[in-house]
Amino acid sequence: MAYGLYSHIQSNRRRSVVLLIGLFFLVYVMTFAGALVAEVVFGGDARLDFLINAAARRTLYSLPWVTIGTIVWILIAYKFHQAMIDAITGGQDVTRQDEPRLYNLLENLSISRGITMPKLKVMESDALNAFATGLNEKQYSITVTTGLLARLDDPEVEAVLGHELTHIRNGDVRLLIIAVIIAGVISFFAEIVFRALFQGGFNWRGSRRGGDSDRGKGGAMAAILIAIALIAIAWLLSIVIRFALSRQREFLADAGSVELTKNPDAMISALRKIEGRGELEGSTSAVMEMCVDNPRSGFADLFATHPSIDRRVEALVKFAGGHDPGPIALPEPQQADADESADQSASGPFDQGGTPPSEAPRPGTSETGAPKPFLPSEPPIGLGSDPSAPHVPGPWDSKR
């Protein structure tokens, strides 16, 4: 089974590389679409084949600059992506002194796997979720919400950390961030093209250097429609590719967590508690794609980046031998805080009457508080002793 798991991870990595190459190809498709729009808006009407050939020449000339611009975009994101994510989520670095429970769990898992321990971050949120980010060992970090820490026990938190560590180990985090970056490039290009198209007001004038045979042939509208179709297809494919990079990896991350912790039930109960409670308010879709769960329902589930919790639990039960407790009901955060305050009041140093609460009997005393005798009332039986031997005074003589 281990061979099957690791071979599947390698296969996914190869497919991810192909998908990322496809994303770069989409950038060039967007460039061609932009060149086609530019030919119409700034050059005037002409035959469709003339417009396409002119746009192709413009695209070839601009490919080096487009490639450089894309690389610069990626380098900027490489350097500052974590700062941007922290600005969106409010994640803060924590140390062993700040979160000893969480820090020790992550440290033990990292040691057991033999990998460098990622940075640890905590974000203030009632949502139950966690996510990993980073592009190399120096940047990798795991962010956990305060809601998840408050409502999951240690084995469940450990399972979630194992899930995120597996994403890091398998390279899922790096590939997903790169895909999000390039998808951002595509969105940026699409906005530029649409601005040029609609702000130009479809007012194309002027003559073509090809002469009358190239002018006024009515190919402009067809060229515009082709450009819009290419932009729409590239944008949709970038979204589909991002889904493919995330959706299949969640099963592997769940399995990797079980491999690390040897506790499938903890992973299952963690998923059941997180189910429907993972939405991070104010976070972008790109951040939600990195989380343990990205909740979607109804029609929106068609565009979900994660398999449903039911499918993931079903896989863990089938292949890891876990037990599914079914949906787990949790009290609302306000109710949980109120219950905790009530418990603390009930167990305070004094009750409402001002009398100290009853204490557990101290060692050496009875339930009434009277001292217990240090020695039993009768001496132990002397096995093998001679009854006719002279009596030696002992500590029990005073009791007789």
Image (spheres, grey):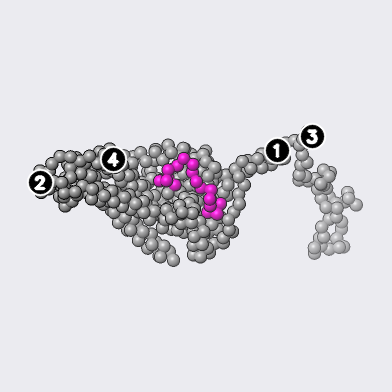
Task: Please rate how many residues cluster around mark 2, counting C-alpha atoms within 10 Å: few if below 14, some from 14 to 19, many from 20.
Answer: few
Question: Does residue 247 lie above or below 88 as drawn?
Answer: below
Q: What residue did someone put label 2 on?
A: 212
- Select label 1 or label 2 by which is in front: 2
CA gap, disc 4 to disc 3?
77 Å
67 lies left or right of 113: left
Pick whichever of labels 1 and 2 is earlier in the sequence: 2
Q: Amino acid at mark 3?
A: Gly
Question: Does residue 6 lie above or below 53 as drawn?
Answer: below
CA gap, disc 3 to disc 1?
13 Å
Q: What residue did someone put label 4 on?
A: 198
Task: Please rate how many residues cluster around mark 1, counting C-alpha atoms within 10 Å: few if below 14, some from 14 to 19, many from 20.
Answer: few
Percent position of residue 236, x then y: 34, 51
CA gap, disc 4 to disc 2?
27 Å
Q: Is residue 276 magenta?
A: yes
Highlighted range, magenta: 270-288
- Residue found at x 82% / y 57%: 380
User: Do the residues bearing badges 1 and 2 touch, measured as CB atoms within 8 Å?
Assistant: no
